[in-house]
Image (cartoon, grey):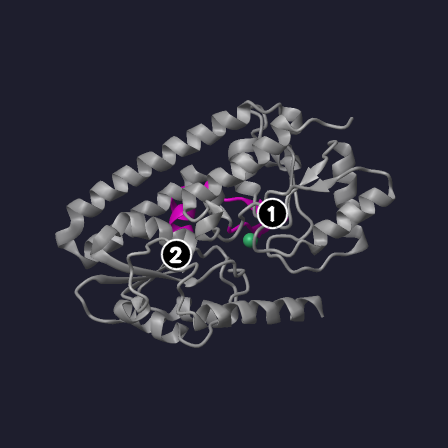
Amino acid sequence: MIKTFRRFLTFLTCAGLLSIGFLYGCFQRDSSRPTSYLEQWMQDNGKIKVLSTTAIIDDIVRQVGGDRIDHISLICGEIDPHSYELVKGDDEKLSAAQVIFYNGLGLEHGASLRYQLEHHANAISVGQSIQERSPDQIIYDGGQLDPHIWMDIELWSIIIDPILQSLKELDPAGSAIFEENADRLRQAMLHEHQEIKSDFQQVPAERRYLVTSHDAFNYFTRSYLRSPDETEQAQWSKRFEAPEGLAPDGQLSTTDIQKIIEHLCEYQIEVVFSESNVSKDSLKKIVHACRQKGLEVRISNKVLYGDAMGSSDSGADTYLKMIRQNADAMISAWKYEGRTQ
Ligand SMILES: [Zn+2]
């Protein structure tokens, strides 16, 4: 029932986004674009037409392609990419795209979208590129492949290469510009990766324990929260727990709640984080159950961005800003807010 309601809400959100011409979410980052950007994207103006499934991929594509490409993302705003199904107008975008970049690794598992991605001649899984380059860096959670690879900036920077390669093939005359853009972006990403790493080292290791709504932060935990001696997954994985698994579904059993409460007690965790595109209901149930047991646990007033970037006024409307906001939200909660015990 909850699942059906959530899907209905997702449909309403998506329909709303479509009806306002995708002004918000998909195209929010460039106010100079005309309102008919989608129409322009469809027109033959000599620019490469690039479609990415998520805005997180689209942001990397935008920075590599610059002015020589027209780019849009399929999944707009704060819609869950795990279960996204095609809506009216998506077929046209998929047909018009000269190249499609998608996450893969099981992220886009809505049947209608997955079918299109598997049958499109020019659909490239950026996740697969990472898996081929660095197979030992891919995380399996309970035996299941974890698709949230963007949560490690250094790992995510690998996707610049397949994007660069593809754009160069489609527009050889732009090769030098693409290369230059890619180099600049790679440096910015690797710099931010190190900055965030060192910022977290300022937080005592015993406070770096993250609890969110769903399992989107395994890669983040391994890169930024673990202590240097925690090299094995069995060691660092204790620093991250979430009630809803790899794909948020709103289903929570009493056992799930109990498991999180035990985790909160064991590591003396007093603050949990909601995610911008996932219902807070699961976390509210956990906090309520904690209070009944006399445990003081609260939900942070700063949300994390797991599967979707934020709106333009959130300050998390680019990939790097999104990861930085996540880091700052955790650091301020752990470093500057005193514990009650
Ligand atoms: Zn997710």
Task: Find the distance from the CA under tag 2 to the CA under tag 1.
Answer: 34 Å
- Residues in magenta? 125-147
Q: Residue furthest right?
A: 293
Measured along the vertical axis of the image, is residue 153 above or below residue 336?
A: below
Q: Specify whether residue 232 is in view.
A: no
At a point 81% along the width and 54% down the height, the residue shown is 254
Q: Is residue 133 magenta?
A: yes
Q: Find residue 41 and report its horizontal and vertical position in percent.
A: 28, 67
Q: Is residue 237 magenta?
A: no
User: The residue under label 2 is which amino acid type?
Assistant: Gln
Q: Quadrant of the N terminus?
A: bottom right
* Residue 241, quarter of the rendered image: top right
Give the class, few, some or many, for how many residues have Cα within 10 Å of label 2's Cα (few <14, many ≥20): some
Q: Secondary structure at mark 2?
A: loop
Residue 215 in the figure: left or right of residue 181: right
* Residue 273, quarter of the rendered image: top right
Mark number for residue 28? 2
At a point 59% along the width and 56% down the height, the residue shown is 247
Number of numbered labels in the structure image: 2
Indicate which label's residue lies in the foreground, 2 or 1: 2
At a point 42% along the width and 41% down the height, the residue shown is 320
Q: Find residue 7 and report its horizontal and vertical position in percent.
A: 60, 69
User: The residue under label 1 is which amino acid type?
Assistant: Asp
Residue 131 in the figure: left or right of residue 235: left
Q: Secondary structure at mark 1?
A: strand
Residue 76 in the figure: left or right of residue 277: left
Q: Quadrant of the C terminus?
A: top right
Mark number for residue 141? 1
